[in-house]
Image (tube, rainbow, N blue to C red):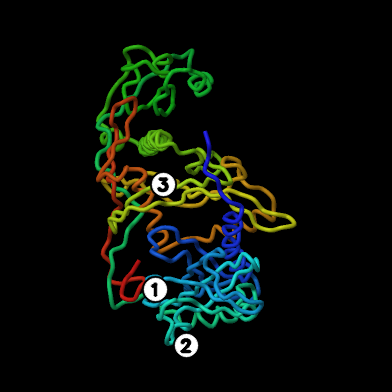
Amino acid sequence: MHGKIVPQSKLSEWKGLDRISQVVHDMGFVYREQEKDDLGIDGEIEICTARPDGKGRISTGKILKVQSKSGASFIVQDTDTTFRAKVSEKDLRYWHQFDVPVIFIIYHPGDDRLYWRYVQGYIEDEPDVFDPPISFAFDKEADRFDEGAYDRLFELCNLAADRVSHDVGETLYTNVLPVEELPGTIWVTPVLPERRSRFHERVGGSTLRKPPYVFRAGTIITLTDPEASDNALREVVESGTSESFDLMDWVQQDEQNEDDLRALLRSAFHRHLRRLGMHFDKDYRKYFFNDGLSPDAPIRRSWMSSRTGRRQERLVAKFYEYGDKYPIKYFKHWALSFHFQRFGERWGLMIDPSLVFTRDGTARVTGKGALKHLRQARAKQYNNIYMNDVLFWTHVLSDGRDDFAVSIEGVDVLRIRGRPTMVDAPFSVRTSEKGVSE
């Protein structure tokens, strides 16, 4: 089997673009990659200022959007002091309509440097910019994208509009997927007295299937009849002693019963995620994709946004390398954790998108230098970025269906809506195109 060849030049270009986040973090700002519903925007920079006591930084809430390009194919009219970078008319007009500042960053492989320009300001200063062939002019000294750009970026933040508008409302997407159908029955079965010692170890050592269970006070609590099929629990219970109860009646009898139900739902859903091909990290307690991952082979997944109806490809795991003398190498995984929550008489599945960093696709990253870098890279995502994460994982969980079932040994025990709960808010968050909320 022959894998796809990745030229060394392309790897160098990718590494060049990877420097953007490092430069931004070195300035004390926050950089967030935006690889979702972006249509030509690669990320955003949030401006931060130093705290008065000098301990840490304070977010200003001001955002600059970033579009980046890389490669010799974009470079024209290259000299020792200047060059021009080609852009398309479609991209330029799209960037121009944003009501937040957009900066264009390009990696010049010949110089091994990043350069940048403020898009809206460039358009104002160059009235003929839309005349073909369209390109941006760069000064190799004045337009370097490094820590020397700090003051200019900080000035741009004053041009950014306030993020919250009270003039226009919007629909907010929560991270709650409503549980439409709970199991109707709970099963309580005594365990044979001689099998109660080291119970979990005994069940775990069996080669038979292991349905979700809770072991408490010499009994097991299950969502299915443990005697109905050939499984590990059948070997440890007293034959013919299983009792079934109405689930909601049973939950209301004891506060501990609700916790036990939550544990059973969590165990059942864990199996659902594993069937989807996701790896479970016990330390992080998060789920992510890692099958087939290598430094030259990132993992992507196709999905459709329930908000836009657009099908797209999504990066879910990728290798990164920073630094020359003491390089930091790691895999970045877009990950998921979850829990079940009761809201009055209703239940919901709460999903929490996040990031995981590993050395080899499984083992966590260690070392003070690496962890400091990763804390910067793990800057919390919010608003449209977090929303798109929620919509992406909802699609993964439901396979794009309106609702989906969670099963145990072929029996559906849980049905969950394939779309998150939405709320109409009297305000909106401005982070993208003029008049349009992301």
Residue 325, image x, y percentages: 75, 57
Viewer-proximal residue among 99 and 202: 99
Check disc 3 and give the amino acid type: Arg
Q: Position of residue 89 (x, y in %)?
A: 39, 73
Q: Nearer the viewer, mark 3 or mark 2?
A: 2
- Vertical placement of residue 110 versus 130, above or below: above
Horizontal placement of 43 versus 189: left or right? right
For numbered disc 1, what is the local secondary structure?
helix
Image disc number at residue 301: 3
Q: Check the image and report above or below for 408 versus 385.
A: above
Numbered label attached to residue 125: 2
- Residue 28, located in which quarter of the rendered image? bottom right
Q: Amino acid at mark 1?
A: Glu
Residue 89 marker? 1
Q: Residue at x 41, y 19 (%)?
A: 233
Q: Quadrant of the C terminus?
A: bottom left
Q: Observer-nearest residue: 398 or 93?
A: 93
Residue 368 visible in the displayed image: yes
